Image (cartoon, rainbow, N blue to C red):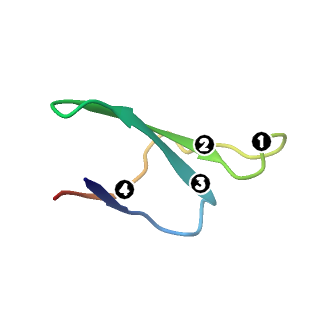
Amino acid sequence: MLRLRLPLDPQLYPQISGHKTRYAIRFLPLDSENGTVPARLSFELACC
């Protein structure tokens, strides 16, 4: 199980896919037409 913590300001949501040994995280804007994803994004990741 993964747990993410990220700021609310950029208004993004994570799309997580993977297997038990590896995973990929993609951040998508809530507003798909006008939203942008910053080049750098700080977040915390916990593997439980």
Q: Earlier in the sequence, mark 3 or mark 4?
A: 3
Side (left or right) of 46 relative to 18: left
Seen at 25% across and 53% down, the residue is 1
From the viewer's side, name the closer residue of 21 and 38.
21
Seen at 42% across and 63% down, the residue is 6
Seen at 68% across and 43% down, the residue is 36
Q: Earlier in the sequence, mark 1 or mark 4?
A: 1
Q: Are marks 2 and 1 in contact (CB under 8 Å)?
A: yes
Question: x, y (%) of residue 12?
Answer: 59, 54
Side (left or right) of 4 relative to 40: left
Tag on residue 20?
none
Tag on residue 12?
3
Tag on residue 42?
4
Q: Nearer the viewer, mark 1 or mark 4?
A: 1
Question: x, y (%) of residue 26?
Answer: 47, 37
Q: Are marks 3 and 2 in contact (CB under 8 Å)?
A: yes
User: Is 18 rendered above or below residue 15?
Assistant: above
How far apart are labels 2 and 4 at the CA level?
Answer: 14 Å
From the viewer's side, name the closer residue of 44 and 46.
46
How far apart are labels 3 and 2 at the CA level?
Answer: 5 Å
How far apart are labels 2 and 1 at the CA level?
Answer: 8 Å
Q: Residue furthest right?
A: 33
Q: Are marks 3 and 4 in contact (CB under 8 Å)?
A: no
Which residue has dot 1 on it? Answer: 32
Give the residue type at disc 1. Answer: Ser
Which residue has dot 2 on it? Answer: 28
From the viewer's side, name the closer residue of 22 and 40.
22
Q: Residue furthest bottom?
A: 8
Side (left or right) of 27 relative to 33: left
